[in-house]
Image (tube, grey):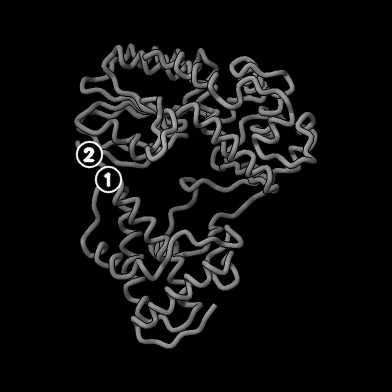
Amino acid sequence: MDLDKLIEQKIRESRLYGVTKPLVIKDMLKILDDVNIKNLDKFIDSYYDTFYIKKEWAKENPSKEQKYRDFLNIEKELSERLTRIPENEDSTRYRKIVTINQEWLKKSQKKFNKILMNILLDKKIRGIKQKSVIPYLHSAVKQRSYHTNAQVHIGDKYVFAIDLKDFYPSVTKYKLYLFFKDKFNLSSDAAMFYAVLSTCKSDDGSYRLGQGLSQSSTLAFLVNYSLFNYLYNLSKENNIDMSIYVDDVVFSCKDEIPQSFIDRLFGIIKGNDMLIKRQKVHNYKRESVKKITGVYINGNKTRVANNKHFEFHIQYKYLRDKIKNINNLDEYFKIYNLYLKFFGNYQHIKMVEGRVHDRYERFIKEYDEYFPKGINKKQKNSNYQKGNIKNIDDSNKINKCYQKLLNKNKITIDVL
């Protein structure tokens, strides 16, 4: 299977291909009538808010008491947002976050990404979930995740893992413009519109693929698909398995990976104007425990970090003790928010390890019906609480769950 030809064929079948009329583009992406897509670049900066947060690994090691507080913390905003990186501080210790302040732009970018993602998926058939047409890609596509990425490399294998440096920022507005113009057979205006739609102003004043935008992960791969396909074919020739998850590229083999392959790999990446984070190059021996996209591999088993098990257990103990003593709605919401955090950890551990201890399964089986999932909030960045439930049906649903829990606990109730 020639993956380059397959992707190029999928691009030609894309809804974007050859479409240059502004009205058709606006209708396709659900863009507001009063937005002039030909001069979007004049206003795009005002549609974004930018801030910096300190990366988790760069923070001071917390005390045991602080860990407990973090495990039980239900607040959404845990990291201090900074408008700029403090003077004399290492910029690599901070992550740049871009948020969109225009609802129409969020929706348009999600629509745009959905169209782009279909290039990487097989044909849509009703009732059948789409699968990726790229065997080694585990980000930006449905049915794949950080976990499936790690699963490629389970077993007694040698593993060589690299992390591409500034993967998103390496895709400039001009590179995107050329990609859309040449690959999608677009006019200069249409190609530039898509490039502007997908880039944000960087610290040096240039425009690069935006961190956190819906389409960034998909485009970061598509712009570089020839490079990744070449590496994949090279790996197959050497009986090496390869996988990609965003900027993590991992190779594994039952035999030791030859230095000649590694040298060639570095040369190819450098020749394509990309860099490798030297501090994130890992060459694991066959008997070593390997860490791949946050998942630990030990022989044929995958595990989450011990700290995640500790967090999960602390949340369980707290919920088990407090859930029977709820006697008003405010207390219910506190437990509700923490339960959702606990349930997220449960899903993560079960996905990676295949099972969780019976005591957690029993607890979830007993109490899950009292904490509904998928409730819409008015303000997504805030917790579930009085006044932050979007519609009356969801309010009624929570009231019923609250009543059922209090009836179970034999306590009188108040309402939303």
Front residue of this view, candidates 94 and 128: 128
Q: Which circle's residue, 2 or 1, is located before the other in the chain?
A: 2
Residue 207 in picture, x, y percent from top left: 68, 29
Residue 98 in which image quadrant: top right
Q: Does the residue at mark 2 contact the one at mark 1 (Cβ under 8 Å)? A: yes
Q: In the image, what residue type sits under mark 1?
A: Arg
Front residue of this view, candidates 281 and 217: 217
Residue 136 in picture, x, y percent from top left: 37, 26
Q: In the image, what residue type sits under mark 2?
A: Asn
User: Is residue 48 depicted above or below 276 in this figure?
Assistant: below
Front residue of this view, candidates 152 and 120: 120
Front residue of this view, candidates 358 and 31: 31
**Quadrant of the rendering where the C terminus is positioned:** bottom right
Residue 127 in picture, x, y percent from top left: 38, 40
Residue 106 in picture, x, y percent from top left: 64, 44
- In the image, which disc is placed on residue 303? 1
